[in-house]
Amino acid sequence: MFSPTIPDDLLDAISRDIEPTEEPFAAVAASCGMEQEELLQQLRTLLEKGVVRRFGAILNHYAAGMSANAMVVWRVPEPDVERVGRIIASFDAVTHCYERPPLPDLPYNLYSMVHAASWQECEATIRQISQQTGITDYLPLRSLREFKKSSVSLRPEVGRGDAASSEG
């Protein structure tokens, strides 16, 4: 079994925002005291071993004009979860889609986050998802205000100070 030993400086460096430049990993490598190719090889190994799933940009949807969003919970029959989850996840307006066990007071098992420029557009997307999946038992939980939004920190004691507070 692969048990990664990731140097703290590398862990810290890949846990922070990376500047959008032509060679974004050059500064990360320099901060770790290594050449860019060495850093990239270490990252490839972490990807191959499944320690890191991917590197990608995180869009600040409020800054991009997507000020309406809702967590939509869906009650989906167990045999249909995979099919319905894939359909929901295929929508561009959906940023998260995952299964959770139903709770006594909240008997829904698929959760999705839908973003849009307006609440009307968000509702229209939710209706379209319902039509395409055939699932009519759902509950949109509209976001009113964002208190915090940050990337996952691989070392919680290392703060990045990127919390936000936005009206939505």
Image (cartoon, helix red, strand yellow):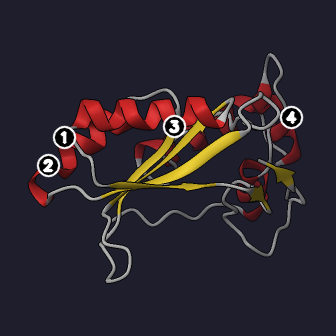
> Which residue appears at 67% of the width and 32% of the height?
118
Q: Earlier in the sequence, mark 3 or mark 4?
A: 4
Q: Which residue is mark 2?
A: 80
Depth order, front residue of 50/130: 130
Q: Which residue is mark 4?
A: 27
Q: Amino acid at mark 3?
A: Glu
Q: Residue at x 83, y 50 (%)?
A: 167
Q: Earlier in the sequence, mark 4 or mark 2?
A: 4
Q: Residues within 10 Å of mark 2 (few under 14, many from 20)?
A: few
Q: Secondary structure at mark 2?
A: helix
Quarter holding the N terminus? Answer: bottom left
From the image, tell me which residue sits under label 1: 83
Whether pointer 2 and pointer 1 mark residues with C-beta atoms closer than 8 Å, the reply is yes
Q: Are marks 3 and 4 in contact (CB under 8 Å)?
A: no
Pair 1/3: label in front: 3
Amino acid at circle 2: Asp
Label at residue 38: none
- For badge 4, the amino acid type reads Ala
Up/down of 34 relative to 2, above or below: above
Q: CA distance from mark 2 to mark 3?
A: 23 Å
**Disc number lying in front (1 or 4):** 1
Q: Quadrant of residue 19?
A: top right
Q: Residue 123 — which label? A: 3
Q: Residue at (78%, 38%) from the top-left corner?
A: 62
